């Protein structure tokens, strides 16, 4: 193995994952080949910048951690955020309730309070915020947080429910204000938010939990005419706004609208994607299309859970065939 900039040969190690059962096993013995493979590394050629790796802060996980002793809770958080652990650098949390919450709740509980004079994050103060702050105290290098609402407050929507429905146009400014007040409230609690997504899963989730529906045009209009200008006006211009926030299969439809021109893309800092519906196909063409459409904008996977094909989820051989 050679480097383009170094004349001497470099030493390398080989680790193998295989259908035979090896899982990142270090390979020490090699069979000789009549045609050896020469690997040349060009350290000067760069393709992407890694923003970070991590997981999510949810009310459900925070509530469970709070049932543990302080020592055990610290041990778990050390495993994720400690210098000798996973050392998470990019995380996500929910704005008001989500499917990993103990109940449905909103920060704007008073109906038709368009100026959000009664806005409160009190629901987050017993479990969620303490978990974030404890992780923050453990992390030496720190981590960024992306925050996502699963739904607008129900009274801002046409169906007046937590699940489904669309944001009513007369509440566009109120929903933008909702983000600004959230950022301010969390900052006061000692937690700065690095970025936000407009809504989690704008295509919906089969009406299984909190959601608000947006088309690519509806979201882009909201970002350009309401959310972006509001955050800029209130001093949150450095907070990243990520669009879409659903599965990779829909990337092209969304970036064609989001990045159609300079005006449409003005307040978008990037694209948020989920890995569902992609057990064995990671949609490389769609990801590359998004990157080429806006090379200077973020492309961040914001959500992932176990996403296995049923009934093949426990059949290793099926995955290797794919």
Image (cartoon, rainbow, N blue to C red):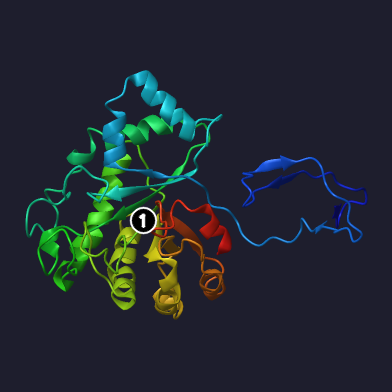
Total labels: the figure holds: 1
Residue drawn 27% across the image and 40% down it: 60
- Relative to 193, 230 lies left or right: left
Examine the image and state in which quarter residue 173 appears: bottom left
Is 215 placed above or below 275 here?
Answer: below
> For this rendering, which residue is in front, 270 or 190?
270
> For this rendering, which residue is in front, 74 or 22?
22
Q: Position of residue 112 (x, y in %)?
A: 7, 60
Q: Residue lying at the far left in this picture: please name it.
A: 111
Is there any visible trace of residue 114 in the rendered image?
no
Tell me if mark 1 has few (under 14), some (14-19) or many (20+) residues whose alpha carbon lies within 10 angstroms of its own.
many
Disc 1, SS: strand
Examine the image and state in which quarter residue 231 appears: bottom left
> For this rendering, which residue is in front, 100 or 3?
100
Q: Position of residue 318 (x, y in %)?
A: 52, 59
Is there any visible trace of residue 3 in the rendered image?
yes
Residue drawn 21% across the image and 61% down it: 175
> For this rendering, which residue is in front, 191 or 30?
30
Residue drawn 52% across the image and 53% down it: 316
Is 202 placed above or below 106 here?
Answer: below
- Relative to 3, 147 lies left or right: left
- Relative to 37, 60 lies left or right: left
Examine the image and state in which quarter residue 238 appears: bottom left
Image quadrant containing the C terminus: bottom right
Q: Position of residue 41 (x, y in %)?
A: 80, 56
Pointer 1 residue: 196
């Amino acid at each position: 193995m050679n480097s383009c900039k170094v004349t001497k040969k470099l030493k390398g190690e080989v680790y193998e994952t295989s259908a035979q059962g090896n899982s990142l096993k270090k390979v020490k013995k090699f069979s000789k080949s009549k045609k050896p493979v020469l690997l040349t590394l060009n350290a000067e050629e760069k393709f992407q910048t890694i923003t970070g790796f991590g997981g999510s802060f949810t009310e459900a996980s925070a509530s469970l951690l709070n049932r543990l002793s302080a020592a055990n809770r610290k041990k778990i958080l050390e495993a994720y955020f400690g210098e000798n652990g996973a050392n998470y650098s990019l995380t996500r949390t929910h704005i008001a309730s989500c499917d990993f919450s103990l109940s449905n709740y909103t920060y704007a509980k008073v109906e038709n309070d368009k100026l959000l004079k009664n806005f409160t994050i009190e629901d987050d103060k017993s479990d969620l915020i303490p978990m974030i702050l404890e992780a923050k105290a453990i992390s030496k290098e720190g981590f960024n947080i992306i925050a996502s609402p699963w739904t607008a407050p129900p009274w801002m929507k046409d169906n007046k429910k937590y699940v489904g429905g669309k944001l009513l146009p007369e509440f566009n400014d109120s929903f933008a204000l909702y983000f600004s007040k959230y950022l301010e409230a969390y900052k006061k609690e000692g937690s700065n938010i690095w970025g936000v997504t407009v809504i989690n899963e704008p295509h919906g989730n089969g009406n299984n939990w909190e959601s608000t529906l947006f088309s690519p045009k509806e979201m882009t209009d909201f970002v350009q005419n309401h959310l972006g200008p509001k955050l800029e006006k209130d001093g949150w211009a450095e907070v990243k706004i990520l669009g879409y926030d659903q599965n990779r299969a829909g990337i092209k439809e969304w970036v064609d609208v989001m990045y159609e021109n300079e005006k449409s893309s003005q307040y978008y800092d990037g694209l948020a994607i989920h890995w569902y519906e992609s057990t064995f196909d990671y949609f490389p063409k769609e990801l590359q299309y998004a990157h080429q459409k806006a090379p200077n904008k973020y492309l961040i996977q914001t959500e992932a859970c176990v996403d296995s094909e049923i009934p093949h989820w426990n059949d290793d051989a099926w995955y290797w065939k794919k």
